[in-house]
């Protein structure tokens, strides 16, 4: 009887251990919406290399920032700017030494493939009387929206076109407004315009980088993470030459590859 009880207890404990180990192999990543397509590739490669699972949640950087301040259970935060990360670090909500600027984003004018608008005019095409709706990300919490506003003000166009704005909750929703026909044109992330599933849906023209402040994108491992080792491992993977090359195919500018030698970073 005692042997049977011990055996049942052993099996039960083993099952609990397996369950906990399985749970420990998944990390939750809050990522800016401009990473929607690029990070699906990154996560797939990481999972293949390590056997660890990555749960991706995409949204606006500003909303994620507020959620993290209120205790949202993310392991890593990849923002479309660096200010949010620096504020979280200063507030003691980031793991020390994990702040990393992984890319610089770019904005483009984007129209449906069927559109007759001449994008060679640059931002001045927005004055075309055939345009009734212009999609941009909400500048209150989306860095790409703030970049769009800055570019328009740089060209003295903001006041002339602001009445036509359709605001997306994030840059991915902004692009969807153009695809669906809810907007005639949009100012979106280059990374979305270059995504394999989006290339055939529209045409784009880059907005000169000097027309808006640099979209410096940064990441941190969160202090509250319950999977810090796996989170650091994922962050190290993003710094690898393989991933930086992948990010460049989506139009991002990236820093030089970093060889991470810490135990947390080894794959």
Image (cartoon, rainbow, N blue to C red):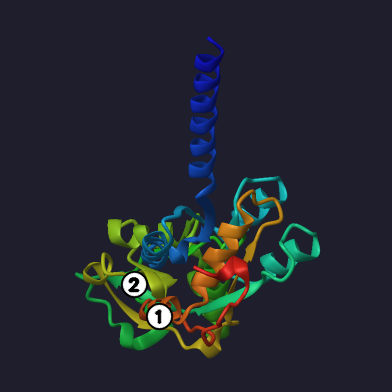
Is residue 153 at all visible to an observer of this figure? no
Q: Residue at x 22, y 75 (%)?
A: 116
Q: Is residue 44 left or right of residue 197?
A: right
Q: Nearer the viewer, residue 236 or 62?
A: 236
Q: Are marks 2 and 1 in contact (CB under 8 Å)?
A: yes
Task: Indicate left or right for 81 with 185 as reference.
Answer: right
The answer to whether one can see residue 162 in this image is yes
Q: Secondary structure at mark 2?
A: helix
Dot 1: what SS? loop
How far apart, in angstroms, are the residues tagged by discs 2 and 1? 9 Å
Residue in the picture at 43% in, 72% down: 189
> Where does residue 89 sit, x and y in percent of width and height?
75, 65
Q: Determine which residue is flagged by label 1.
A: 251
Please name whichever residue, 123 or 139, is drawn nearer the observer in this view of the structure. Answer: 139
x, y percent for residue 167: 48, 58
| Residue 258 location (% of width, % of height) | 56, 83
Of mark 2 and mark 1, the one earlier in the sequence is 2
Q: Is residue 232 above or below residue 245?
A: above
Q: Which mark is residue 199?
A: none
The extreme right residue here reads 91
Residue 108 pos. (x, y %)? 41, 78
| Number of marks | 2
- Numbered tag placed on residue 193 in the rendering: 2
- Residue at point 54%, 39% (across, down): 20
The 10 Å Cα crowd at callout 2, few under 14, some 14 to 19, many 20 or more, is many
Q: Residue at x 56, y 58 (%)?
A: 230
Indicate left or right for 222 with 116 as reference: right
> Is residue 221 placed above or below 68 in the rendered structure?
below
Q: Nearer the viewer, mark 2 or mark 1?
A: 1
Residues packed near mark 1 inside 10 Å, few (<14), some (14 to 19) or many (20 plus): many
Residue 64 lies, with reference to residue 71, above or below; the image says below
């Amino acid at each position: 009887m005692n042997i049977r009880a011990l055996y049942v207890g052993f099996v039960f404990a083993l099952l609990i251990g397996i369950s906990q180990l399985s749970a420990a192999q998944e990390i939750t990543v809050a990522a800016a919406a401009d990473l929607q397509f690029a990070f699906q590739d990154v996560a797939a490669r990481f999972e293949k290399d390590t056997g660890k699972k990555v749960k991706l949640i995409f949204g606006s950087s500003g909303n994620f920032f507020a959620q993290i301040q209120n205790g949202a259970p993310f392991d890593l935060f990849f923002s479309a700017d660096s200010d949010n990360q620096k504020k979280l670090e200063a507030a003691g909500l980031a793991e020390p030494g994990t702040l990393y600027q992984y890319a610089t984003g770019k904005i483009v004018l984007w129209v449906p493939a069927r559109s007759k608008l001449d994008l060679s005019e640059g931002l001045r095409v927005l004055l075309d009387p055939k345009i009734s709706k212009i999609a941009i990300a909400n500048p209150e919490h989306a860095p790409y929206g703030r970049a769009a506003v800055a570019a328009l003000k740089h060209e003295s166009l903001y006041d002339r076109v602001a009445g036509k704005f359709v605001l997306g909750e994030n840059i991915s929703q902004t692009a969807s407004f153009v695809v669906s026909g809810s907007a005639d044109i949009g100012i979106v992330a280059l990374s979305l315009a270059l995504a394999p599933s989006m290339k055939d849906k529209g045409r784009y023209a880059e907005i000169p980088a000097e027309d808006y402040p640099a979209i410096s994108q940064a990441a941190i491992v969160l202090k509250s993470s319950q999977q810090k080792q796996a989170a650091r491992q994922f962050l190290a993977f993003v710094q690898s030459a393989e991933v930086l090359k992948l990010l460049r195919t989506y139009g991002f500018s990236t820093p030089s590859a970093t060889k991470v030698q810490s135990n947390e970073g080894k794959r």
